[in-house]
Image (cartoon, rainbow, N blue to C red):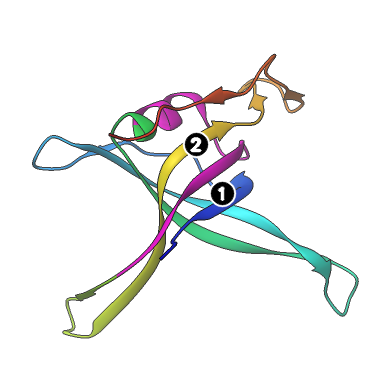
């Protein structure tokens, strides 16, 4: 069986690095991915995909990426559920990232894109 996802899109907000009680680093990001067709109004819609990044992948993404950064993510789809405070079952579908490639770099003090001389690939999670 195969469970593999590849996404190329822009981060919707700055990644925030967290540390689990076990000491593992993690960040959750949302990637806006344009669809391949136009809607009835001639506009291009986007899908907003939730992604979870662990360990070194999370650390490097939080350090080098910001809102609007263009990233390529490969990973797998995972579904999970939990009960919220009202006792309702909540289902979550997300991409668990194995690699993240930084496809551009935006300077925080400049609105224009500053492309990297080469792509930076984050080592696969062990």
Which residue is under mark 1? 12
Q: Is residue 3 above or below residue 115?
A: below
Residue at the (16%, 42%) spot, across then down: 20
Which quarter of the image is occupied by the C terminus?
A: top left
Front residue of this view, candidates 74 and 108: 74
Q: Which sits earlier in the primary sequence, circle 2 or circle 1?
A: 1
- In the image, residue 76 lies at what x, y percent? 42, 56
Residue at the (9%, 42%) spot, across then down: 21
Residue at the (64%, 47%) spot, across then down: 9
Cα–Cα span, label 2 and label 1: 15 Å
Magenta range is 59-79
Q: Is residue 43 magenta?
A: no
Q: Is residue 125 left or right of residue 24?
A: right
Q: Nearer the viewer, mark 2 or mark 1?
A: 2
Secondary structure of the residue carrying tag 1 is loop
Front residue of this view, candidates 9 and 43: 9
């Amino acid at each position: 069986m195969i469970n593999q996802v590849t996404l190329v899109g822009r981060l919707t907000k700055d990644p925030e690095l967290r540390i689990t009680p076990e000491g593992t680093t993690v960040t959750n990001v949302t990637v806006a991915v344009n669809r391949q067709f136009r809607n009835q109004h001639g506009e291009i819609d986007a899908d907003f995909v939730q992604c979870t990044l662990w360990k070194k992948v999370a650390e490097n993404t939080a350090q080098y990426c910001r809102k609007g950064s263009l990233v390529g993510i490969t990973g797998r789809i995972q579904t999970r559920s939990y009960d919220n405070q009202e006792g309702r079952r909540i289902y979550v579908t997300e991409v668990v990232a194995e690699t993240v490639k930084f496809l551009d770099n935006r300077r925080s003090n400049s609105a224009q894109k500053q492309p990297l001389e080469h792509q930076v690939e984050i080592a696969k999670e062990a």
